[in-house]
Image (cartoon, rainbow, N blue to C red):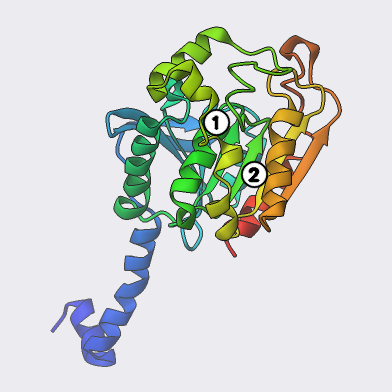
Amino acid sequence: MDHPVLKNAVRIGFAGVLWLAIPLLVASSAAPDWPGQPSQWQGHAKHDFTVDGRPAYVVVPSESVDGNPWVWRARFPTFHAEADQLLLDRGFHIAYINTDGMLGSPAALDHWDAFYDFMVSQHGMSAKPALEAVSRGGLFAYRWASRHPQRVACIYADTPVCDFRSWPLGRATGIGHPATWQSLLTQYGMTQDEAIQFDGNPIDVLAPIAAARIPLLHIISMNDRVVPPTENTLVLADRYRKLGGEIEVIQVDEGTEASNGHHFTHPDPKRVADFIEKHTRR
């Protein structure tokens, strides 16, 4: 009996050998194998692949943490990514599926369902990711969170579109974007009159999100003429609080003139990272 494992089995018993194997199983589940050829993003491995016929990727931390927490980016996934870099250093995965031109339509949300299953059921990620939404990404994040409130830990939104009658229609004070408005009508399969009467915008679908006690954090610029806060975040925040929900709003006085006030230097990425870590690990 010269084999070292057999010697150990005799010495500590078969149950002891099984016990020694448990850390190996845990380590394997904490570091799933991702498809696709790896590349690099900000010093971390990035894997590009296809899910449900759509391009997607995941950025992998150097060291995963218990529970495999992750951030799910909605649209413009590299914009204001400073908080993501902090979270990667804290063991979070950063993930994205490209449904860019679909503007949060029902078909886009179906692709999101498939991506969630890919991340959670097939690769062992946390069942409650943090959603990050930039600008029109608000249409995706809030509409999907309303569809599946039990699947969301928290939402962080950066100058988000909360009512598509504000952008891209530009019905009130916003500058709008006519080409994107026509695209939205196509994606949603609606006439203009139907879209104006639509009750499925983020400002309209907050009740299940509030009932699930999902915390929200928004950052806005007060001179934003693309997605005016008075037609978007400030409306959403007022309604969410009346429903008993928790929302924090970071206000930046002025965005850049070149972006019509829509873009700015992020004032506090650490606050965002801390918010996401707190609510995904709670």
Of marks 1 and 2, the one in the foreground: 1
The residue where tag 1 is placed is 137
The residue where tag 2 is placed is 86
Q: Dot 2, how many residues are within 10 Å of its Cα: few (below 14), some (14-19), or many (20+)? A: some
Q: What element carries label 2?
A: helix
Q: Dot 1, how many residues are within 10 Å of its Cα: few (below 14), some (14-19), or many (20+)? A: many
Type of amino acid at the residue the image marks with label 2: Leu
Percent x, y of residue 41: 51, 31
Q: Is residue 158 above or below residue 180?
A: below
**Is 21 in front, or is 71?**
71
Is residue 262 visible in the rendered structure shown here?
yes
Looking at the rendering, which quadrant does residue 78 occupy? top right
Q: Which label number is shown at residue 175?
A: none
Residue at image position (22%, 86%) is 9
Q: From the viewer's perspective, is 147 left or right of 85?
A: left
Residue at image position (32%, 67%) is 25
Type of amino acid at the residue the image marks with label 1: Gly
Looking at the rendering, which quadrant does residue 280 occupy? bottom right
Percent x, y of residue 128: 48, 55
**Is 37 in front, or is 121?**
121
Q: In this view, does 46 lie above or below 173?
A: below
Is residue 274 visible in the rendered structure shown here?
no
**Quadrant of the frame with the N terminus:** bottom left
Percent x, y of residue 56: 38, 32
Structural distance between the alpha carbons of marks 1 and 2 = 21 Å
